[in-house]
Structure formats: structure tokens, C-alpha cells
Image (spheres, rainbow, N blue to C red):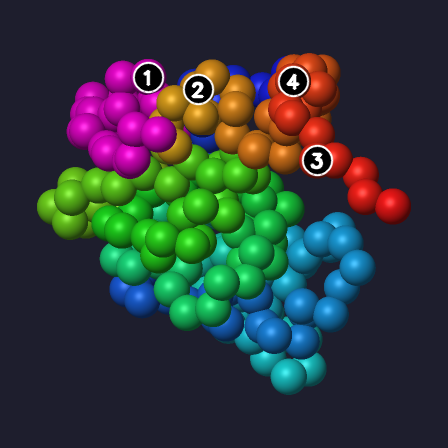
Amino acid sequence: MALAEIRRVEGKAVYLPGDDIDTDRIIPARYLKVVTFDGLGEALFYDERFDASGRPKPHPLNDPRHQGASLLVVGANFGCGSSREHAPQAIYRAGFRALIGESFAEIFFGNATTLSMPCVQVGREDLTKLAQRLEEDPDLRVLLDLEAMEVRLPGWSFPVRMPEMARQALVSGHWDPIADLLEAGELLEAFDARLPKPERRL
């Protein structure tokens, strides 16, 4: 089955300040006891966004100016800590479709890629400037172009980077290895038929 080719992601963006934001903060451990990932978006950064009574706290994701954002801008080593897949799942189910940051934890990056959610790296200077632009104009439209490997916004663009294998997987629509295996079912069966079969012993 053909998957969507992820070549561009465009929309509003929200900056989440801080380095070394780990998966425990992204999705608290009590939300891991789920059968499906449905509804995880509501738990994204829950303990940082709400108090013990469920009242909203000051947080970029609670700011009405950033509602509907589809790009998340982050600092260095984002997604470190545990390898829980729930972290990128929560981000994706909250409506985000790409992350722009200084760097990402390796396992988080891999889990995000298999959700079709690109994580691109940017230099600190450009990251700081982007954060300032978003603060000045929260409605700014940001375009991430994975073919040109750059981010564009009115009057400015800057280069981004990501491992080429991940980029190719996204732009070609082969970001889910399980889907690739299912699509190659007949080829796998044909290959299996050519393999020598062990002798059966009574």
C-alpha cells in the first residue's frame, strides 16, 4: 500500500524553549497504560501545562495565539530519556506534523520518522532568530521543504539538515517499515519459495 510522500510541511509554528526536554516531560508515565495511542495528544506535556486540579498553567502550548500550529520548534537533545514511542505519538496526535530543533535524541528521531513526522536540525543562531520571529508574529506561516532542505518564511530562509536515509524515506513515502513489508508480501513469498527447504525427519 502506498504511503503519503512527505515533501513539505507548512503551517503555523510554536517555539518550546529549553534543551534536554525528555520523554517523561513530553508524556507523563501514567499515560503509557493505554491499548491504543488514541487521545494521547491531550496528554502532551500535561504536567507542565496543567496543575493538579486540571487548570491551565502558562505554557506555549496553552497560548491561544499558537492554537492550530503544525510545526514544533525545540532546542537541543529533544526527546532524550526513555525510548517510549508514546512521546512522538502524543506530539503527532496533538496536530504537529514536523519538528525543527537544534538536535534530537536518536530513538525519538527514529520513532518520529516512522510516524511520517520529520525532525530537522538547525543551527543555534537560526533557531534563536526563528523563535524571535514566532514571538513577534505567532500567525507566521512556516514552510519546511524536505526536497530543498530549508525552512522558508516571509523575507527569510535558512538551511536544515537530517540524515539522508530518513529524508529519502519520507519524500519517497517509505517511512513505515511495516508497510513496506506488507507491500512486498508477494516478493517475500516468491523469495521464500526459492530457498532450500530443510529435510523432514520422522
Please tell me which residue lies in front, 105 or 90: 105
- Disc 3 to disc 2, how far (Cα)? 41 Å
Which is in the foreground here, disc 1 or disc 3?
A: 3
Look at the numbered discs 2 and 1 and tell me whether their residues touch, using CB distance below 8 Å. Answer: yes
Q: Secondary structure at mark 3?
A: loop
Kind of residue at badge 3:
Pro
Read off the magenta span. Answer: 141-165
Q: Secondary structure at mark 4?
A: helix
- Disc 1 to disc 3, how far (Cα)? 47 Å
**Mark 4, residue position:** 194
**Mark 2, residue position:** 171
Q: Is residue 147 magenta?
A: yes
Question: Which residue shows up at 28% across the image and 64% down it?
Answer: 19
**Mark 1, residue position:** 147
Task: Point out the residue furthest to the left here.
Answer: 125
Query: Could you tell me if residue 97 is visible in this image?
Result: no
Q: Give the quarter of the image for residue 185.
A: top right
